[in-house]
Image (spheres, rainbow, N blue to C red):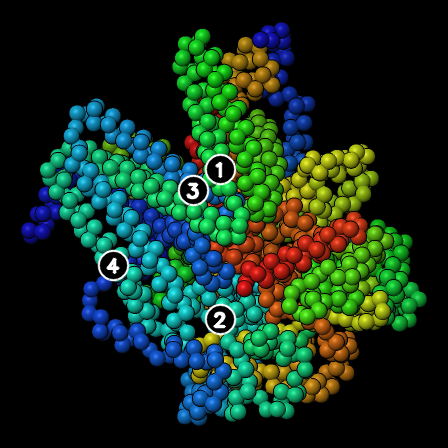
Amino acid sequence: MDNRQSPKQKSHLFSVSTRRKIVTYIILGVGAFISLVPFFWMISTSVMSLGEALGSTFFPSELHFENYAEAWRRAQFSEYFLNSFLITIITLSGELVFSILAAYAFARIDFPGRNFIFTVMLSTMMIPAMVFTIPNFLTVTWLGRITSIPWINNWPALTIPFMGSIFSIFMLRQFFAQVPDELYDSAQIDGAGHLRFLLQVVLPLSKAPVMVIIVLSFIGTWNSLAWPMLVTNTPDWRPISVGLMNFVNEAGQEINLTMAGAFITIVPILIIYFFTQKQFTESIARSGLKG
Amino acid sequence: MENKNFFKRMFTGRKGRKLKEYLTAYLFIAPSTLLIFIFGIFPVGFALFVSLHKWRIKRTDMIGLDNYVRAIGNLAYVLVFALGVGALVGVYFLIRRIIKMVKENDDQPWLCIFPGLLYAAITAAFLNWFYRALPEVLDIADKLRGLERTQEVFMGLLREALRAETVVPAWRLFLWLLLAGVVIGVLVRRFYQNRRNMSYQMYFALIFAALAAGVGLLYYTYQQVNLAYVEAMAEGVDPGIWPQFITISSGAFLLILAWILWDRAKKVESSGSFAVHILAALILLVGAWLLIGEIPTIIASGDENLWEGLKVTVFFSLGTVPFQLMISLFLSILLFQKVRGSNFFRIVFFIPYVTPGIASAAVFQQMFSNRQSAPVNMVLRFLGIPAQQWLYEPRGIIQMFGEMLGLNLPAWAAGPSLALAVIMLHSIWTYVGYDTVIYLAGLGNIPKVMNDQAEVDGANSWQVFRHITFPLLSPTTYFLSLIAIIGTFKAFNTIWVLRSNLALGTTDTFSVTIFIEFFEKLRYGYASALSFVLFAIILFLTYINNKTQGKRVFYG
Amino acid sequence: MKKTSILVSIVLVLTFVLAACAPQATPEPTQPPVEETEEVEEPAEPEETEEVEEPAEPEETEEVEEAPAFEGVTVQFWHVYSDEPGEGLQALVDEFNETNEYGIFVEALNQGNYGDVEDKVNAGIQSGDLPDVVMAYTNALADWYSVGSVADMNPYINDPEYGLTEDQLNDLYPHLKAAGSTPDGAWIAYPMTQSANVLVYNFTWAEELGFAEPPATAAELEEVICAAAADNATKGADFEGTGGLVYYPSSTNWLHFLYAFGGDELNEDRTAYDFSTQEAIDTSMYILDLKEKGCIWQTESYPNPEQAQRKALITMSSTAGLPYYEAAFADEGNEDEWGFIAAPGPDGTLAVNAFQQMLGVIPSTEDVEMASWLFVKWLTSPEIQARWVRISGYYGTQVSTEALLADYAEENPVWATGVQLAAIGPSEPQTFPAWSSVRRTINDMAAELYNATDQAAVEGILATLTETANELVEEVQ
């Protein structure tokens, strides 16, 4: 125990002295800079001419916004953007509904086999992703063959396999479990069943984790590439990532165009993130607590 | 009307309400569970099936454990054997549990043995049917040639496949057992009315399932080892699997024994405890010596790429997780002081995490290009350091530092390659924001009183951090490290983007090795076997992490 | 917004339940009458396909004569062209669909790049959903042929009615039949176009450096690129470390030099892989030497902008990269004269690494296979091929195509220099067993060779390569 410090010194600890503040800001500033540097670089390259993009300049001498038009046209984004939105919305709504229901049951209803089922599902998170490609391809093929809707080259193959998400269930369960039991008891006295309790009490309290799932799933679905390529044969349902990849294959050497194309695909994610970031950071944070 | 009454009766009363509750729960989890079963668990069973075959583009022969032996040498036999033994040990614990339950409640649940046995048999029968039906269904791919692709044709072929000679009896057996299971289950419920009836039935079912799995695995290992012996003897070599078996098993046994003793020692009186500790340590030494002597020679006959991949993965984990956690802890503590604009920084730090990994990897690729004019090389040049090859550099970073200082370090001390270091940087860059935000939340949960109290006691800020903040953050650290370690073992996409053959494989983690086997070399059987090896390693790490960190975690 | 999302989710739940219930229900009917379904189950076709694989020409022609029309036959064609070439190809296919006298309908679908096509066919082999005609490199087609998923085209090419005439066969460049045939004689890959990995050479800059003629030997090559590298060393920061030759150690580029050095992948009696040859050692040592002298370097992407910026005197590229080089030179406003040359060996041997964009037919019924062949035949007929070359910038596969493109060659002098080069070859032994896997190993080894320190190391790496390659052959046999 070191008790020799004077009270004056102690006050420096968590109160904010100016010197300390400056150091803090410098460190945070450097952190922010490092976080953002690749972005600056990406954006600035995307408006450069090709020669500049390959040179050693950090800032474009003149702005070539036509790169964006060129990338948009050559990657056929107008064709693929709508597909991406549809795929993402369908996946998200399915995933949300199913995950909320399941997470509620896992969090608040005691039923035989609860832990067993949950653990088994959770362990699938530890399996390398490559294992799933071929069996799932076979499954969607067969589901399309024996049901009346075609799956391959259609929205079911692109969306339904991703509607069951153990990660979402896991995250929501953490939140639903925190809702006080008293609320349920009083709801029950009012004659509300589980579904009503879920819809009227639990969900309004859980906007934040729902946001998290929306953003994370959005990112995941929006960026998926290998699977959509595998299960589509025509451009009808191909998402934007496929368009970008085709374009990058062709324009790989034109970094400025590639960066413009990549930035276009990121924009929707950034928009979603900025609109939800408050709930998002808060709820990510809370989910981490009771891991 | 009658129907309605029946349902009404069914769901009223205490029992009925419970049933309704169960049904609601199952209904709620049904869609997700079904989907996860179809797209998450079925593929695992499928992969297990694939891993037992020689399967290059197309399935050919069933080759048993050969793929595993190719990957990890004869250790494969030992591990399957250990799985069998593990199942039998599980049986022992389950029996103990049942006996305890019986004694506590003074029950006579022995009637439940029958439904338990039946449930286990139903599961086995289903797996048997699956195992027989799968190849038939897969063979349809060839029969489809030139056929009109209509739903009727597919249904016809599917029916034909499921009616193959080997499949039908398996299906019938399953149906009969299912019927018997339901009938006996209901009957036993009638005759043995006990609140814990279902639990007993489930426990017995588990016991029989584990028993069957254990015995089955042991027999399978025995058979496979014999097969290997026959093959090797034909070539005139002694594969020496049995001796390896004995050394490794006894080594593992001694390790477990030592662990149990060590655990017991805590409960023994202080004087005896010392002796027990010594004994445990001795046994541990012997066991470890046995294992260390044997395992490297065994796995040396396995796949070199796998161990290289594992080494790279370990580098990747060790080079990212601790740094990532330290940086984010530091940043979160800074942010936690009420600085103005902390919300802004929080958003900014988090941006790398929401950026698609492939896009940011592409940016890193350009920034860490080997060109003289690439941004990072420009910075180096500004600092008077020669430009580097970055992602094209296979030399280890420690080795390179050594060379700079004029030292000649041995090969084992080379460290991760510079190329891997760039990939690590990318990974750290991506996840620091996420970790920071979670640490912030953890900090928010620490009661302010505790810090204040410590200050009053005269601790300096390092002491407060060391003795109060950090221990109280342990659940957060535990969660983050677990997620991060699993993440590094599964990481693939960004590494693939940043990978170059010029790095000479120093960036190929285990996942990358698996991907190459799957999608480039098209060895589906072998790649599936490798995936299970990786799965086993991740499970083991999770378990170790739980055991070591989980215990010390201080849930404040 | 809320309403619609709820609506969507309800619809989804319903469709999902419907979709998910159906497969579950299927295994149940084990007992129902067997007779009914048997009719469906035994369509005669699958047995017929087996016959197709054994070339039984006379029988086939009889059948074909009985039913000469292919009315209503749809052929699915997977290719790798998007953007402008994709539209051009689609226009050709549309034309075929309108004008062909057989009533064949071709559905052409872009499936991404060659890697994507390979992934999709590999997955399709598992599920049974495959196209009828697929575009791929020969080694991939050979892999699929080895598991029975690509048809031997001999019966169709030799078909008296629909096959190629003697003249047409002779019109095809002589090496192409061998390039598309397996060692046992099955013709599994029919060339749509050709291209070659060549050296792209900046004539103007070389002249400024004092080299009037392109290098004719390996020694001359070294001289000219080292001169360029030395030139750039004086130009300032952005040019530091650039200059000479952009050589990325990939299998394509390494083999290219190996060919120039007179080397080969196979042993003398062409029964096994053999890389432990003097030529392979010389090639690797030559490249290592250039590296040490600082005359070669790498970029992380295609090097055409560097060529246009005079950061590289020579780059290695597929002739198909021509439009991108043109764009890069135009973008830089660089008026230098540049073109394709072959890599020279020590004794003046010139070599490129030639590739063919191959079409393979996937086994199905005889009718569909024949219809597929008819489409392949049409697409590669000189007149159509010439039009496709104008769109894609690849090279033709027949003598008469060359004649039809005289004006195009005149307008595109750089393209014209490649015509002869593609013909010199050689090509990789793509139909030799396990070539796909061996090629991948060469790719890794080329990087190791580039990092080797001395000749002993090089020899060691080549010995490992030979050993690994022959092990890979064992694996597929």
Labelled pair 1, 4 in contact (Cβ < 8 Å):
no
Q: Position of residue C125 (x, y in %)?
A: 46, 66
* Of callouts 1 and 3, the N-terminal one: 3
Give left or right: position of C190 versus B94: right
Q: Which circle marks residue B80 in the picture?
A: 3
Residue C203's image quarter?
A: bottom right
* Of callouts 1 and 4, the N-terminal one: 4
**What kind of residue is marked 2?**
Ser
Q: SS of the residue at dot 2?
A: loop
Look at mark 1 in the image and give the residue it sits on. Answer: B243
Judged by depth in the image, the label closer to the viewer, 4 or 2, is 4
Q: Which circle marks residue B169 in the picture?
A: 4
Residue C168 makes an appearance in the image = yes
**What kind of residue is marked 3?**
Val
- Badge 2 sits on which subunit? C
Write the residue at 49% across / 74% down. C362
Write the residue at 29% across / 48% down. B124
- Badge 1 sits on which subunit? B
Quadrant (top left/top right/bottom left/bottom right) for the C terminus of chain B: top left
Q: Name above or below for residue B130 compared with residue A151.
A: above
Q: Nearer the viewer, residue B381 or B493?
A: B493
Look at mark 2 in the image and give the residue it sits on. Answer: C149
Q: SS of the residue at dot 1?
A: helix
The answer as to whether the residues below labels 1 and 2 share one chain is no
The answer as to whether the residues below labels 4 and 2 share one chain is no
**What kind of residue is marked 4?**
Pro
Write the residue at 47% across / 75% down. C363
Give left or right: position of A157 versus A68: left
Most distant residue in the left direction: B2
* Of callouts 4 and 3, the N-terminal one: 3
